[in-house]
Image (cartoon, rainbow, N blue to C red):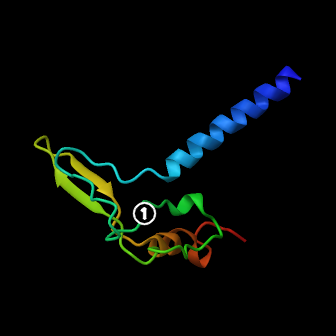
Amino acid sequence: MKSMLRILAITALLGVQLAAAETTWYVGDERCRPPKDDGTYSAPYDAREHPGDFPTFPGADKPGWFCSYQREDGVLVQHGNSLTPQQQWLAVWAAGANAMN
């Protein structure tokens, strides 16, 4: 019985963490401030997490937020992706790109 309760508690905790991860807005740094969630950009999206599920949610056709710069030591820093969620999904999953068959 205790092990069943432990499993349920762990499952609930993981569910809360996954739900929180989906609502996270863009992150940046002091030189790349993320935009406000005002509908200008799509929500952050990772096509690898949605095999076989083409994005059709509201805003799936809007570009993602993107910012990049070169640090003083020459390293390129990039935040976000300017592709729409639909473009990201097609780039990863269309035309058998990842052997989904």
**Picture coordinates of residue 51, whole percent (x, y):** 63, 65
**Residue density around tag 1, few if under 14, some if 14–19, many if 20 or more, within 10 Å:** many
Q: Is residue 18 above or below residue 55?
A: above
Residue at far left of view: 72
Q: Residue at x 21, y 52 (%)?
A: 32
**Picture coordinates of residue 34, whole percent (x, y):** 27, 54
Which amino acid type corresponds to the residue marked 1 in the rendered image?
Answer: Ala
Q: Nearer the viewer, residue 53 or 41?
A: 41
Q: Is residue 61 above or below residue 48?
A: below
Instruction: Name the image quarter holding the N terminus.
Output: top right
Q: Is residue 101 left or right of residue 27?
A: right
Which structural element holds mark 1?
A: loop
Quadrant position of residue 82: bottom left
Q: Residue at x 60, y 63 (%)?
A: 50
Q: Is residue 11 above or below residue 63?
A: above
Quadrant position of residue 100: bottom right
Q: Nearer the viewer, residue 27 or 8?
A: 8
Residue behind mark 1: 43
Q: Is residue 25 above or below residue 63?
A: above
Instruction: Name the image quarter holding the C terminus.
Output: bottom right
**Picture coordinates of residue 48, whole percent (x, y):** 55, 59
Q: Is residue 2 left or right of residue 60?
A: right
Q: Is residue 80 left or right of residue 47?
A: left
